[in-house]
Amino acid sequence: MATKPPKETDLYQPIKTLLEGQGYEVKAEIGAADVVAVRADEPPVIVELKTGFSLSLFHQGIDRQSITDTVYIAVPRGKGRVFQGNLKNNIALCRRLGLGLITVRLKDQFVETHLDPAPYKPMKSKQRATRLLREFSRRVGDPNTGGSTRTSLITAYRQDALRCIAYLSDNGPTKASLVAAQTNVSRARTVMADNHYGWFDRVERGIYDLSPKGQQALSDYAAELKSIKDQLPR
């Protein structure tokens, strides 16, 4: 037997019961608000109801913040990993927007408040900022287009690896120390030894050459390699 899709009205009574248990007087559809709760002289509590997370739900919640700081959004509680992932992400979004978040498990009317409204104070990561600026300073030029897929990006590390294969393509098997000196890639030995892209073969201790994948990369990154070769010493 097919389960009937939830309706916004299914959320109202469980949330009304929860708020009344906390001493609020609760009424529905006051002005533009789905649920309004008032207790003594405190600012009103507003709850916006939807059958699932959506951009319009967040828009409504933000709009209600012009009335009161105590605004919640409420959705039915789902099952499985997908819903749990969405819940986690939307809790994080609500925290940034200063919204509260409530779910209702419709089968037994269980209401859970996952987040109360509060001003958002973002925590800055000094480590991530340092990593970002280090990559910015190491990257030569601006080889990418904003919005590109991550797998196709030219990072500073990939640029160093390309400088190494550019040199090896012209000079054949070479000592890592010489590759480093001639390409200005101080970490050339590490790049070739770690071989993250599979572009290098160690032919003997400290000496590297291009692998078959490295030969293919000469074609795959032809435009970038032409620019690199123009910068290498002759």
Image (cartoon, grey):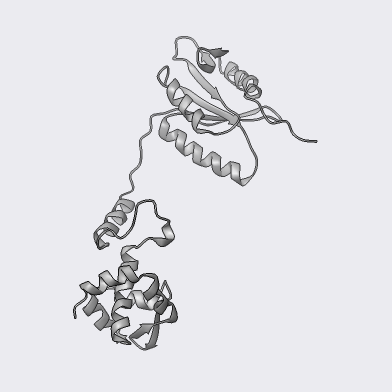
Residue 168 lies, in percent from the top left, at 31, 82
Q: Quadrant of residue 120?
A: top left
**Taking 60 as reference, is 150 above or below it?**
below
Q: Pick the residue in front: 50 or 189.
A: 50
Quadrant where the N terminus sits is: top right
Q: Pick the residue in front: 73 or 42.
A: 73
Residue 131 lies, in percent from the top left, at 31, 56
Q: How many marks?
A: 0
Q: Pick the residue in front: 42 or 152.
A: 152
Q: Does residue 124 appear left or right of residue 96 in this picture?
A: left
Residue 128 lies, in percent from the top left, at 33, 52
Q: Quadrant of residue 186?
A: bottom left
Instruction: Give the residue displayed 60% in from the left and 22% down from the top.
Output: 15
**Taking 154 as reference, is 85 above or below it?**
above
Residue 231 lies, in percent from the top left, at 21, 72
Q: Pick the residue in front: 54 or 85.
A: 54
In the rendered image, is residue 105 in sight? yes
Most distant residue in the right direction: 1
Instruction: Give the residue displayed 53% in from the left and 15% down from the top.
Output: 37
